[in-house]
Each structure stands twice: as C-alpha cells, then as structure tokens.
Image (cartoon, helix red, strand yellow):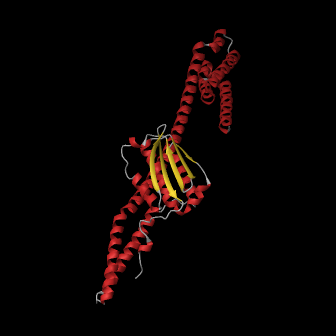
Amino acid sequence: MRKKSSSIYIFICSALVYMLVSIAMFPFLEITVMIYSVPLTMLGGWYFSYSGANITTLLTIPFHYILLNIYSDDPLVVQEAFNPFGIGTQIVLSNATALLKRSRDRYNQLNESLEIKVAERTSELENLANYLFSEQQKETAALTANLLKEPYENLQSTLKMSERLLKELTEAKHHKIMTAKHIHQIISDCIKQLHEIENHALSSDNGADNLKSAVLAFIAELKRVSSVDIQFVDSDLWNRLSDEEGAIYGIITEAITNALKHAKPSHIEITAHADSSQTIICIENDGLPFAMNRSEGMGVPLMRYRAEKIGASISIDPIANRRTRIQCRIPDSKKPSKLIAKSAVKDT
C-alpha cells in the first residue's frame, strides 16, 4: 500500500512539473512539447501499467490542444495536437514501458518463488540427510550389538573353564592359585564390559519418555521426508511395554524402515493387541510382498535379535491384497533371554 501511494505521489509531482515547464517554456519548445510529453506517458505506464500509459496519453492530447490554441492562431498548428504520429509514438513507448515493468515484476515474482522452493527443498534434503544418518547410526549400533554374540559365548565358555580350574587349584592348594583367580577376574571383567557395550549399542537414544511417544516422534520425523501414510493405532497396551521399550522401538523402526526401502508402500499401520497369553505388536504395509524383496539385508536378523533379547518372536507373513504383516509376539509370562546375562558373572 505504501509503495502504491509513493507511486501516485511521484506521478502527480512529475505531471505538475511537466505542465509548469510546458507552459513556461512553450514559446521556445513550440510543437516539440508533444515529444516532451512522452516521458510523462512512459512514467504512467511504468507505475500504472497499460491503463496508466493509455490514460496519460489521452490526457496529454487536450493539454497539447489548449497550449497550441493559446500560443498560435494557425488552424494547421492547432491541429497538430491530434497528430496521429505523435499520439501513436506516445502510445507505443508508454505501453512498451508498461510491458517492461510487468515483465520485470513477473521475473521478480518467479525469482522469489524459486528461492522459496529452493529453500524448502534444501530444508527437506537436510531433514532427509539427518534422518538417514540417524538410521545408519541405529543400524550400525544394532549390528555392533549382534556381533557381540560370538565373543560373549566364547568368553562364557572360557569363564566356566577358569572356574573349574580355579576350583581344582584351590583343592590342590597349588601355588598358582592367585594367577588363576586373576585370570578368572579378567574374564569376568571382559564379560561385564561386553554387557555395557551391548546395552549402549541397543539403547534407543530417542529422547522420549516412553515407547509410545518415541514411536510417534519417529513417525513424525518420517512424515517430514516421506509421503507414505503411517498410522499409529493407540491403545493402553503401549503403556504396559515400558520394560522392553528399547527393543520394541528398534523392531518397529526397523520394520518401517525396511518397508520403505524395499516394499514401496503407500500405507503402513502399527497396532498392538493382546490375547490370552501374549501381547502382539503388528506392523503392516500394503507394498510389495515380502517374497518379492530382492535382498533381506540385516533388517530381519536385527529384528529377530532384538526379539530374542526380550523373549519374544518375530513372524513375517504375506496376507491378502498384496500386504505384508510383521508381528512381534511377546509372551505375558516371558523370561527375557539376555544375550549377556549378569547372573553368569560371578564375583571372586
């Protein structure tokens, strides 16, 4: 609004200067005052587009006629106020100015629109990069935890052997008994360290207070970088799974991520329900059937690994209408089979 008022003010001032100079200098300008009118009509076209150009041109015609009629008695000179060449020149130049101004405004508008779109796409790419980096970190952490299984089993076997050796040396009152105790302690410390590494690798660093809010935060992040419809069906069961929320969160996020990577779904639904003996977490998508996926990768093994951690099981079943359902079954009376059990580590 301020810009439009400024344009009107500048145009009015220019028109007054034009008329004063034309009246004062007419005896010297003579008929060339018509050419002097061209800048005013071009200014009208610049500020008020085609209508401003044409209206300003029409207003200069009676002004020319009055000036010529006052300063000349020659009818032929007075008729020059209606000279089609002069009027046509004003119309062409003023409308060309209006076209130039409109083209410039359109260019500026398109440029601003392009800058906004570039900023939006840049923001989306940054969000996608952050998300992919986060998922890569989670997958790497889970893979690291999975790789601890074999060294743990070896250490457990060695720990049992050292316990038997320590017992035999104690009974025999062997002078190497302190060395055996030291070896036993080292093995125990290694198992404890593996346990700490495993807990750190499998921790769901999502900053949420509970499983439900963590899953909802993950879905919200996905919706910022994906057009897939992801629906979370709420129920009271989610609040009962706090003891295993880290593993369950990992299973859910892994199932959703795998579906997005391989199945190309348009809809994913996460539900929780219970029967007489177990709680079932279900992640269902309408993408390509599981059998059609080219590569299983580490996704399914990691889900099974996390399920074993809490005494649960994973099943992947194709269902009707080209859908795939992943279920995590958690027994109500489960006894989680920790990969690294603290009870196995004895103090010496």
Kindly indicate the quadrant of the structure image that contains residue 52.
top right
Residue placed at 52% from the left, 37% from the top? 111
* x then y, percent, for residue 270: 54, 48
* x then y, percent, for residue 138: 44, 57
Residue placed at 68% from the left, 36% from the top? 5
Q: Residue furthest front?
A: 276
Q: Residue furthest left?
A: 175
Give the quarter of the figure containing the N terminus: top right
Q: Is residue 252 visible?
A: no
For residue 227, side relative to residue 44 (left or right): left
* x then y, percent, for residue 301: 39, 54
Residue placed at 45% from the left, 50% from the top? 315
Q: Residue furthest top?
A: 75
Q: Relative to residue 37, is residue 268 depicted above or below?
A: below
Q: Relative to residue 34, is residue 303 depicted above or below?
A: below
Kindly indicate the quadrant of the structure image that contains residue 230.
top right
* x then y, percent, for residue 137: 43, 57
Q: Relative to residue 212, is residue 225 depicted above or below?
A: above
For residue 165, side relative to residue 130 (left or right): left
Q: Is residue 16 visible?
A: yes
Residue situated in front as seen by the camera: 5 or 43: 5
Residue situated in front as seen by the camera: 289 or 295: 289
